[in-house]
């Protein structure tokens, strides 16, 4: 009879440890997503200043400025990872177009404000990439835990759901890497 109690106690301890491990993994994914959102917010804050600076030199590019502003608004209003990913890819594409236009204006490329904003945006993009890699690593670990036996039984019973990866498209429309020179 004592062996039954020992086995039950070990089973309960294992269940608690497994459940707590899933909670810790889920919290790491949420924390990593929060890191991405912080960097995306910083990028959203830089974009209006960048658009205004370019606008001073290339006022006739009004359509592009509206596209960038619209893409920024849509990205900010995205509600889930899949939607955010789609909108961020669209925003990245319009920003690449904005920088391509800036190439046509030598005075703009020499403007200290533009150069500072460009440097800040590059730094922010690098931080977004680092945050994205950290998030995707945590998502991979969490999703693996959800699929591995016997943890998958507890995860299914406790209604844990797999998370989506956050992969920003870093290629141009033809699938080739975008080449922008500053």
Image (spheres, helix red, strand yellow):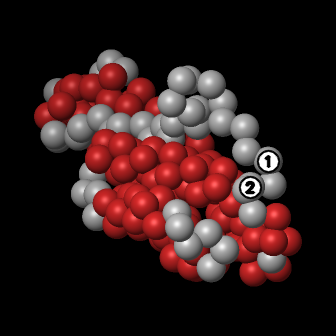
The Cα–Cα distance between marks 1 and 2, rounded to whole angstroms, is 8 Å
Q: Residue furthest top?
A: 149
Residue 143 lies, in percent from the top left, at 38, 32
Q: Residue furthest right?
A: 110
Which quadrant is the N terminus positioned in?
A: top left
Q: Which mark is residue 181?
A: 1
- Nearer-the-camera pick, 73 or 29: 73
Taking the spot 73% from the left edge, 45% from the top edge, the residue there is 180
Residue 67 lies, in percent from the top left, at 41, 59
Left-right relation of 122 to 44: right
Which quadrant of the view contains residue 153? top left
Q: Is residue 177 above or below residue 35?
A: above
Left-right relation of 41 to 108: left
Which quadrant is the C terminus positioned in?
A: bottom right
- Indicate the secondary structure of the residue bearing disc 1: loop
Contact, mark 1 vs mark 2 (Cβ under 8 Å): yes
- Nearer-the-camera pick, 58 or 28: 58
**Classed neighbour count for the residue bearing mark 1: other residues with Cα under 10 Å, few (<14), some (14–19), many (≥20):** few
Q: Is residue 142 above or below residue 91?
A: above
Q: Which mark is residue 123?
A: none
Residue topped by disc 2: 103
Taking the spot 82% from the left edge, 79% from the top edge, the residue there is 112
Taking the spot 51% from the left edge, 36% from the top edge, the residue there is 169
Q: Residue furthest front?
A: 60
Lower sequence index among marks 1 and 2: 2
Q: Is residue 133 above or below residue 176?
A: below
**Classed neighbour count for the residue bearing mark 2: other residues with Cα under 10 Å, few (<14), some (14–19), many (≥20):** some
């Amino acid at each position: 009879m004592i062996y039954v109690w020992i086995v039950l106690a070990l089973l309960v301890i294992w269940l608690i440890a497994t459940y707590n491990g899933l909670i810790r993994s889920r919290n790491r994914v949420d924390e990593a997503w929060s890191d991405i959102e912080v960097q995306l917010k910083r990028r959203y804050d830089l974009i209006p200043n960048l658009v205004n600076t370019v606008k001073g030199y290339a006022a006739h590019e009004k359509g592009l400025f509206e596209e960038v502003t619209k893409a920024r608004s849509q990205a900010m209003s995205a509600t889930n990872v899949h939607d955010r990913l789609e909108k961020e890819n669209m925003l990245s594409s319009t920003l690449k177009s904005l920088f391509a236009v800036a190439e046509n204006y030598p005075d703009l490329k020499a403007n200290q404000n533009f150069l500072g904003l460009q440097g800040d945006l590059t730094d922010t993009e690098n931080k977004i990439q680092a945050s994205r890699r950290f998030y995707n690593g945590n998502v991979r670990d969490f999703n693996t835990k959800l699929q591995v036996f016997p943890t998958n039984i507890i995860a299914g019973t406790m209604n844990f759901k797999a998370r989506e990866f956050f992969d920003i498209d870093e290629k141009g429309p033809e699938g080739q890497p975008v080449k922008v020179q500053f």
